[in-house]
Amino acid sequence: MMQLVVDANILVSELLRQRGKELIQHPGLILYVTESVLSETSHELRKRINAIIHKKGASEELGEKLLEAAQNVINTKITIIEESVYIHLETEARNRIPKDPLPRIGQRLL
């Protein structure tokens, strides 16, 4: 079982992709967000869906379906927690992020 605390940017990106929604719904994955991240996610989803409608010529109906599908995933797979539950783990999590990802990317290209 993998448990992750995610931010709005990650959620919005994945909720707008079919593969992302499938990944979020994986039974071995539990995602946590704070109330403020959930609020930001809802705001950004609407903003990006409106951009899809206006810039790419998608229909309002498609926009509504995208928002509804994203909201269904949020309601069934995202757990709201207080920041105090995980804040003591933030330093450890940040230390796991590679400082310079470019060498790894370069190695993969070779």
Image: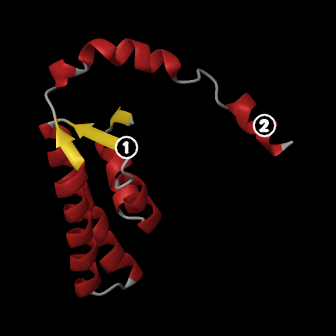
- Pick whichever, 23 or 67, lies toward us: 23
Q: Which quadrant is home to the N terminus?
A: top left
Above or below for 35 versus 12: above
Q: Quadrant of the C terminus?
A: top right
Residue 4: horizontal and vertical position, in percent? 35, 34
Residue 68: numbered disc? none
Residue drawn at 16 percent across, 56 percent down: 75
Label 1's element? Answer: strand
Q: Are marks 1 and 2 in contact (CB under 8 Å)?
A: no
Q: Position of residue 15 (x, y in %)?
A: 34, 59
Percent coordinates x, y for residue 85 in the rendering: 19, 21
Q: Amino acid at mark 2?
A: Gly
Residue that label 2 marks: 106
Tell me, yes or no, if residue 16 can be seen here. yes
Determine which residue is flagged by label 1: 29
Three-letter amino acid code at the position of disc 1? Leu
Label 2 secondary element? helix
The quadrant in which residue 67 appears is bottom left
